[in-house]
Amino acid sequence: MSKSYTSFSTSPVGKTLIFLSLQNQSSLKTHSKESSSSCLVFVPQSQNAAPNSSLYKKPFSESFEETPLLVAVLTYMGYGILTIFGYFRDFLRHWNIEKCHIAHEREQQKDFVPLYQDFENFYTRNLYMRIRDNWNRPICSVPGAKVDLVERVTHNYNWTFEHTGKVVKDVINMGSYNYLGFAENAGACASAAIETTHAYGVGVASTRCEIGNLDIHEELEQLVARFLGVESSMAFGMGFATNSMNIPALTGKGCLILSDELNHASLVLGARLSGSTIRVFKHNNMQSLEKLLRDAIAHGQPRTHRPWKKILIVVEGIYSMEGSIVRLPEVIALKKRYKAYLYLDEAHSIGALGPNGRGVVDYFGLDPKDVDIMMGTFTKSFGAAGGYIGGRKELIDYLRCHSHSALYATSMSPPVAQQIISSMKIIMGEDGSTLGKDRLRQLSENTTYFRRKLREMGFIIYGNDDSPVVPLMLYMPAKIGAFGREMLKRNIGTVVVGFPATPIIESRARFCVSAAHTREMLDTVSLVNLQTPSSDPLHDGRVMGVRRSRRSVSQLIFYLTDSFMCLHLCV
């Protein structure tokens, strides 16, 4: 069964973090009245109900096809085969019949507490190691629309690699988060970064609160605040730490964090480090979220039943593994109803969504003031590094004094700051050209074209129609390695993902569409699996299992082929 819905309404949806303060409800602003509009809603056959159509100003369409029963059975069977062979190989290693490459304690340390837990590493050494060649591939060029890869080989089943000295040229890059194509070594951004390097050097060698606060940092923060439409902002040198080190500064003991089940690891880590109580709601499911909010207000803290100091709901703008967009209009409606604070993580959506490239708030036409805390990164659409938090001036002043990222981390490198400034001004049109608008339009067109092309060809893809993150479902464990290798043979670089990063029966390939991609590149990627079948099903791009009709019984042979691929992988 598939899950899809489309709606027209007057509010947005997005990836968000909500703080509910029972002690400071009066400080929250009221929201404008919701207008009515006509709506068309298709109720999904799943746990996620259709969007509240009265809240959306534009169509909101997402699809998530449930894993077919036969595919699920064969996937579990595949992992079972891999597990059995893994234990058999461990038996051979124990008796030195097969060479053991794994780390282990010396004989003199046998009475010590073990450093290496044998069972905990079972997955790594027996499953991941078989397909390890699909990750950590070294590149030797700019990560633009095409990249050059350093060729490497392994003679011991991926335990170690050797570089051959050769370079694989012009590999179509479908893995980098280069949404607007600013990852480049020529042009206005690169030239400005070079000039800044000559003026400031590369490193700052100090924190912002000591002697590492440069004028270029303050210029960047003022520009970011203007770009987002908020009072103030603060920049950090690392995107991951922007979440993991700032959430603990905002919540603590006596606070409740409500987290979307598919949130990024940085948000999860930040929530755990804060010491707050954590509860998880179903992905993009507003009924699940509202139930947790009601229960939290009605029952308060465990045992004492005192009111929570804050209630924090954690969501994302674009979910990087699902390609879905947060239902921000409904999250904001709940925020208003329950007097909550809202923290919006736009790591993948800033620059990639909205007519002005300002993320999901811009995409849904919302007022930035409705979002109390806006977070994002510069690592994707801006071709740089680091992250930001934007909001009211009081919030930013508080973080400057309490954030571990602000007090203990080295300041952002000056050329990186200049790269962000230059690319952001291009997006805003302040460079005097239409290059920013052109790239935003090109990204939107490429996303629509690529998603439509894959659907028409029968592929099962996840996510929102406007999301540049395009997950293509593989399901079977053997396909993870086979798909990545076969694509590279055809000069296409992509990211393949499996358990534990995804549910065990939902392995996938993830494509990231860029404004730098041409139609020819996208056609090459989408048509690669329509080649004439070869005599060897294990090396047939089409039979490899990603092109799968949802209605045709004849596709059964594709499913059964995967069982043989699993056996081939184990040997």
Image (cartoon, rainbow, N blue to C red):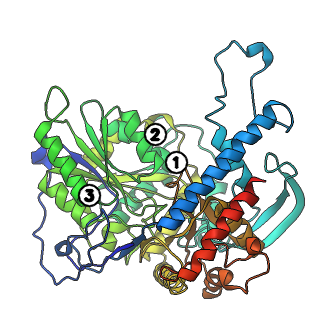
The residue lying furthest to the right in this view is 165
Position of residue 290 in the picture relative to residue 44 (left or right): left
Image spot of residue 210 (x, y percent)? 48, 34
The residues tagged by marks 2 and 3 sit, at their Cα atoms, a distance apart of: 22 Å
* In-front residue for pair 70/501: 70
Pointer 2 residue: 405
Image spot of residue 211 (x, y percent)? 51, 37
Image quadrant where one finds the C terminus: bottom right
Establish if 332 lies above or below 249: below
- Compare marks 3 and 1 and give the one earlier in the sequence: 1
> CB under 8 Å between callouts 2 and 3?
no
- Compare marks 2 and 3 and give the one earlier in the sequence: 3
The residues tagged by marks 3 and 1 sit, at their Cα atoms, a distance apart of: 22 Å
> CB under 8 Å between callouts 3 and 1?
no
Position of residue 187 in the picture relative to residue 64 (left or right): right
Mark 2 or mark 3, whichever is nearer to me: 3
Q: Answer yes or no: is residue 201 visible.
A: no
* Quadrant of the image occupied by residue 117: top right
* Numbered mark located on residue 238 in the image: 1
- Compare marks 2 and 1 and give the one earlier in the sequence: 1
> CB under 8 Å between callouts 2 and 1?
yes
Identity, as a three-letter code, of the amino acid under mark 3:
Val
Position of residue 325 in the picture relative to residue 40 (left or right): right
What residue do we see at 34% from left, 31% from top? Answer: 275
Pointer 3 residue: 371
Label 1, secondary structure: give it. loop
What residue do we see at 37% from left, 40% from top? Answer: 271
The residues tagged by marks 2 and 1 sit, at their Cα atoms, a distance apart of: 8 Å
Identity, as a three-letter code, of the amino acid under mark 1:
Met
Label 3, secondary structure: give it. loop
